[in-house]
Amino acid sequence: MKNIKNMILSSILILSGISFSSCVDKFAVGDAFLEKQPGVDVTLDTIFSNSEYARMYLWDAYKGLYHGHSIWHTMGWANMTEALSDLCHCVVGWSSMVDAYYSGTHSEAGNGGWCRDKFAFMDTSERKGIWSTVRKCWQFIENIDRVEGMTDAEKARLKAEAKLIIASRYYDALFHFGGLPLIDHSFVPTDNFTGGYVSGTVGEGEFVKGRATVEQTIMFVDNLIQQVIDEPNLPFAITDYLNEGGRLTKGGAYALRAKLWVYAASPLFNDDVPYRQYDATPTIPAGYGEDVDPLLRVWLGGYKPEYWTKALEACEAFFNANKAAGSPFEMVQPAGNTENDYREAYRAAYYYRETKEKIIEVRGEGNNMSDGEYLREWGANIPGNISHSGGHAPTVEWFNMFPWADGKNFDGQRVYNTDNPENLDIFEGRDPRLYESMLVPQKNLDTHYNTYQDKTIDIWIGGDIINNWWFTGGYMAHGFGEYKWVLDYHDMANERYSWPYIRMAEMHLLYAEALAQKGRSEDAIVEIDKVRARVGLPSLAVNTNLNLNDKNVLIEEILRERACELAMENSRTMDLIRYKRSDIFKKQLHRMNIYAKDPATGEKSETPYSKMNGVWPDFIYETQDITSYARVWWTDGGWDNKWLLSPLSREEINKGYGLTQNPGW
């Protein structure tokens, strides 16, 4: 049996030293923190001999929380996972997205650099991997009681925060890999890994050796979350943003549980058939669950309707607890009823720090790269540099998802690839979230929201903005530019923000999904409408052509709403995975050439707005297949359902502690 230092959990006993000059009265993940002093050996005894050092140790563990713009949590230092979906497409040739995924060459050997598997599973950095973070949190839990100068109440609160960090990291890995090894305490280098308890508490519950089943992993995470919820010393929400903004709370535990069960109840795991069969039954070492069907590590074994009941109950428990606590979490609401008011409210919801919208907000590190502190162009790979290079070039498919401002689903496709005889402006009068998500041509309404870098948004062929190689070959490679997160970056570069790990709009949409799955369509629409109303959209029911009493139709609309509200928040790709939407993964994606019409001839023109005497043009829209770095999935036979879960490292499997490979890899 391999010992722990050769395993997936391998990390040095103390991950790094401590800078004794740091002030820890204020929660500050971004501070330079564990920088070992020359000639100083820092041990657990050192750390837990002092209350300040102990707090700092936990603050450092917070750096392991998932942040969608961190170089440690993206694919090849470049792409967000959304570039695997139909929302956007990468044209950065050196990225792992192109090299490993679009080419179809990704494998259990992990070729292509840091890919989706390493986002969750591999310790590419001593502080960023799943397992080093889990281990650090267990070390904290096991040692904090010996710290002097700290009240029992604070110790209990900090333990609960550590458990919620562990739960979140397990949640992240579960939906990339399936069942996981259950780690319920810290290991030292001489320990042999045998397994852990499903309850998440040492010595209680069912002991599981090796790789647990999907259901055991779900229960392990759920039980950890329950322990957090049961802790009376953990506040429901943060009230002192100055000193504690970004810390985990009981409200975050309720929210994570709801998201856990909605995702767990989804067809990826919860279906009559597994997402894929094994080509050959994997070999499992003796004593590591060889009598368990290997498919149960990636499947629940059949459809379990009670999972949707649990999902609904978890959503209701969050909203009830939030109400009982005085509703500290709520959606950001617009200050008025203009398009710009709606855009500002939406931006505040996903972008700004310390709003009531964010239930779990993840802070950055301040490492001058993609740190989650600032959106710099050249100092941060993601989203600035990578997006402007074409790492997340929006597609026509994403553009089509946004409804008209009257709430009706977009139907402007009728004028694509025509001379647009009705002169329909497909960019005017749309869902305000479109303009916060994608850079599209917009008339200058003399407000800062309808210009880009102080220029009229004339991004048609020949326009002043698009007329340079940088934009046409990268940022707007498919006719549009990513605006969400990138924003008007030269104005936003010094604006600190936080990653919306879970926010209130998503909670309403999760609740709507659970209600729809339980046959309560009218109640589901009420929850959807709360999200739509924030940006001035009327009820989803205005789409009278849709049979919203049909569960499948309503679920499709919920997924579309999620794409409009939560795009580029690590949501769309996971939605397609959990609903096993191979039809969308295989679908050819499209770009658009936008042309201004010559007012005299009605034919295509390349005249920029600056030379049109202030007259906004009519347009012609030409859609084309995306051919730059085409995905192998778009070819006949190019898709395999194996892609719905990531491969485990063959190097780790060969170490013999019970890991099995996922089907197809």
Image (cartoon, helix red, strand yellow):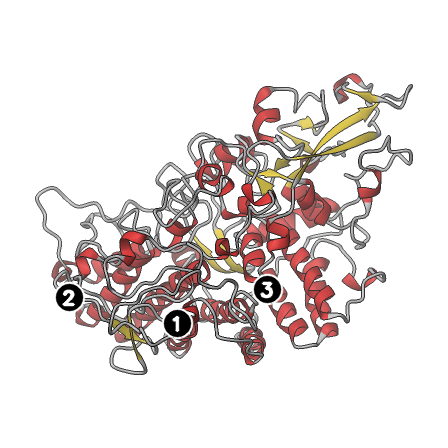
- Could you tell me residue 662's position as x and y percent? 41, 60
Q: Between 572 and 612, which is closer to the camera in this rendering?
A: 572
Whether residues under marks 3 and 1 lie with C-beta atoms below 8 angstroms apart, the answer is no
Compared to residue 546, the image places residue 384 above or below, namely above
The amino acid type, in three-letter code, at marker 1 is Thr
- In the displayed orientation, state which residue is furthest to the top: 611
| Whether residue 24 can be seen here | no
The front one of 591 and 320 is: 591
Residue 575, above or below 366 = below
* Front position in the image: 235 or 11: 11
Q: Which residue is depicted at the point 25% across and 81% down? A: 203
Report helix, strand or loop for mark 1.
loop
For label 3, the residue is 330
Q: Quadrant of the C terminus?
A: bottom left
* Three-letter amino acid code of the residue under disc 2: Asp
What's the mark number on residue 135?
none
Q: Nearer the viewer, mark 3 or mark 1?
A: 1
Residue 434 is left or right of residue 77, and the answer is right
Badge 2 or badge 3: first in the primary sequence = 2
**Residue 553 pos. (x, y %):** 73, 64
- Can you identify the residue that label 2 sits on? 191
Q: Earlier in the sequence, mark 2 or mark 1?
A: 2
- Residue 213's tag is 1
Check disc 3: other Cα within 10 Å, few if <14, some if 14-19, many if 20+.
some
Q: Are marks 2 and 1 in contact (CB under 8 Å)?
A: no
**Mark 3 or mark 1: whose residue is earlier in sequence:** 1
